[in-house]
Amino acid sequence: MTAVSAAVVALGAVGSALAGVRWLRVAQREHYLPTSVLRFAWRWWYGLALNRALAAVGLAGVAVMPVVPAVGVVPCLAAMAGPVGLHLRGRTSPLVWTRRLRTLGATWAVLQSGAIAAGAVLGAGRLVAPVAALATPALVDLACALTARVERRLARRFVESARARLARVKPSVVAITGSYGKTTTKGYVAHLVGPSRATVASPASWNNQAGLARTINERLALGTEVLVAEMGTYGPGEIAGLCAWLRPTLAVITAIGPVHLERFGSEDRIVEAKAEILAGAAVAVLNVDDHRLAALADRASAAGQRVVRCSGRDASADVAAIPGPGGLPDVAAIPGPGGESLEGNTQDAQQAARPPSRQAAAAHAAHLADATPATLGVRGMVVPVRIPPHAQPTNVACAVAAALELGVRMDQVAELLPTLPAAPNRLRSYRSEAGLTVIDDTYNSNPAGAQAALTALAALASSNGRQPSHSRRRVVVTPGMVELGARQETENTAFAAAASSVATDLVVVGHTNRRALRRGAIPPLRLTEVATRHQAVEWVRSNLHHGDVVLYENDLPDHYP
């Protein structure tokens, strides 16, 4: 091997190592799903002009190096330097060397070094090493595919342990899924059921097989009566696999939307994937305000499954939670499920509407002050209640339906509704030390939730202090919404257009949706573009003052461009 060839091979190995660290972090952030690394590689290399130029230089070097061997250093250097902006360890989503990542890293290292070594043995090392360095994302994806089966086998013992614990404890299982609203509804169900029955809910977003098995193995103690399990999915068959060992007593579907449309391809496929949760459940609780779930409710009912239809606007639904004190008609006007008169429920409704005990009223006084009037309808029984301003009516209706199916009394439900908890980082507002009103909606990335956040921004701006609302700054800080497939650009453009009618400023974070948000912004909306979340926060601190309102809508970790 000549000195030039040795230098190219060495640089190729270094370039592969640095690129490997970058793309292993992406694999970890994307749940080790095969093909995810290549998708992000395309975003980084093609999405930014500087990286496109760097990629072009690297590929040109690959084309020329068979003729001029020394040019092989060029693609190696490109792999070492790029894509520009994708950091080795990360700021907002740092690389964590877990057992699974170490396994993936070792598998990738064998593939990468094997390719380079084979090239060297065959006398083509100076050609193979630069190509291998640039192809690191593909090799990391291949490693994800190779280790997936191993990981399933390793997880099996934890699942079997969870299955055995479920058999011993025998809790009622409330399984909740949906494109959005599932984490919030999970919290609502636990809140409404917890005071009456010993309840365990899966924490945070532990909604896959590993998270749910861990929830059961670590938290499901003897005596637990109810397990509230959030179930997520990135593709068909995942929820069916969960329900094979974690069989729901009640299955709840909160909503269908274009979240993860990039992975599913169509919303019809999303419906079918979410519908897997109904198999084997004694009761299906469905948000029929979504026409696709209304059709699913009809299908499930026709198949003999017991279905509870929930709504945030339709008084004829089995459970309806409608904002406003006059949201539902009189009791006698609402037919029961079989058309029978339900006037006999009036006494129960009046009992449920009685004020809580003096001790409970004192404990809930702060919450009641913030809660807003609503009307709850349950199979003909009408109950005036109060719910927090952050509460989404269909989520409330689904949670109430689940609680009642589990035997919680209506008066207990009515007493607990004003104190429904807000999910972390989902439409939560607070006052900063500088006197700004901050709306934290950073865990939301769906069009319906984004529109609700703009409504909240307008409402808070109009009631924020003595300063006239037209003179306050109303700011939206966002990287836009992702994983919406073919609809991503149009949805982000529409969001910016909607923000133009509410906000005075739009601060766009990052490059992922910058073009679409820029296109949708309508003057006099002022547009500011920053590269990172940190820069956006610094802009807010430097430009906003007492009485202004800022909405942080969605947030993306820094493995997104």
Image (spheres, grey):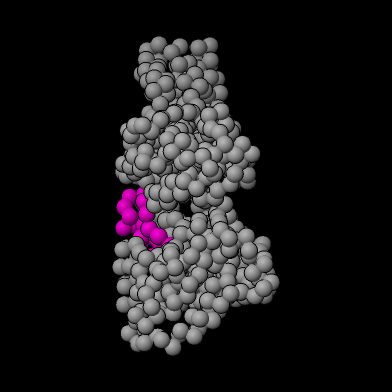
> What is the x, y in percent for residue 227?
58, 69
Magenta stretch: includes residue 259: yes
Report the residue at 35% width, 87% height from top: 340
> What is the x, y in percent for residue 282?
45, 77
Residue 21 relative to residue 139: left or right:
right
Could you say which is closer to the camera, residue 184 or residue 15?
A: 184
**In this view of the protein, can residue 20 be seen by the observer?**
no
Could you say which is closer to the camera, residue 185 or residue 223?
A: 185
Magenta stretch: includes residue 133: no
Q: Determine whether 21 is above or below 175 in the image.
A: above
Count numbered badges in the picture.
Answer: 0
Report the residue at 60% width, 58% height from top: 203
Report the residue at 63% width, 65% height from top: 364
**In this view of the protein, can residue 273 be seen by the observer?**
yes
Location of residue 67 (image quadrant): top left
Location of residue 235 (image quadrant): bottom left
> What is the x, y in percent for residue 290?
34, 62
> What is the x, y in percent for residue 158?
61, 61
Report the residue at 57% width, 52% height from top: 424
Location of residue 192 (image quadrant): bottom right
Magenta segment, which residues? 254-275
Q: Determine whether 374 is above or below 410 in the image.
A: above
Residue 215 relative to residue 16: left or right:
right
